[in-house]
Image: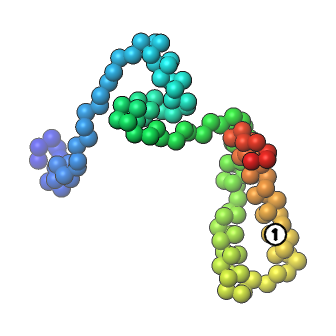
């Protein structure tokens, strides 16, 4: 077939919707700085598009203030299967089949401590006030 493509590949390529061509604009350094300040952390392209079309600007992206704390929190989450385990425990509890033995209670308390630690790390990483 043409260009080394099979018939299904040509058909698939032809049925994909075409994206419109990008639009570019030249800004002076001062104009760009002003728009970046107005955007308050939003992606500049999205801010300019919203401003030009009179649409409300998109929500500002969260700023990570402490990347090490966020990395530790994500590492803790990655090393555990707590989300899956908690889901299984909730399922058993809803069925009335969860025996609350001292071992189960100890495991649940340990999980709650870990979740609290991860939450504290994420709150610190995102720069959220303690009372928030």
Looking at the image, the residue that sits furthest to the right is 102
Looking at the rendered structure, the number of numbered marks drawn on it comes to 1
| Secondary structure type for disc 1 | helix
Q: Place residue 123 in its image quadrant.
A: top right
**Which residue is depicted at the point 47% across and 41% down?**
58
Is residue 62 found left or right of 65 in the rendered image?
left
Report if residue 79 is visible in the image.
yes
Report if residue 125 is visible in the image.
no
Q: Residue 55: horizontal and vertical position, in percent? A: 40, 39
Q: Place residue 105 in its image quadrant.
A: bottom right
Measured along the vertical axis of the image, is residue 70 above or below residue 11? above
Colour logic: rainbow
Closer to us: 3 or 17: 17
Is residue 49 found left or right of 22 in the rendered image?
right
**Which residue is depicted at the point 35% across and 35% down?**
53
Closer to us: 28 or 66: 28
Residue occupied by mark 1:
107
Looking at the image, the residue that sits furthest to the bottom is 96
């Amino acid at each position: 077939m043409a260009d080394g493509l099979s018939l299904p590949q040509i058909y698939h390529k032809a049925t994909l919707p075409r994206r419109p061509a990008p639009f570019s604009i030249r800004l002076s350094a001062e104009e760009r700085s002003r728009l970046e300040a107005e955007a308050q952390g939003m992606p500049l392209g999205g801010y300019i598009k919203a401003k030009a079309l009179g649409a409300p600007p998109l929500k500002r992206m969260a700023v990570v203030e402490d990347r090490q704390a966020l990395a530790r929190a994500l590492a803790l989450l990655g090393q555990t299967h707590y989300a899956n385990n908690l889901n299984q425990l909730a399922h058993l509890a809803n069925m009335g089949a969860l025996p609350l033995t001292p071992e189960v209670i100890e495991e649940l308390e340990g999980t709650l401590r870990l979740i609290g630690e991860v939450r504290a790390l994420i709150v610190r990483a995102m720069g959220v006030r303690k009372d928030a």
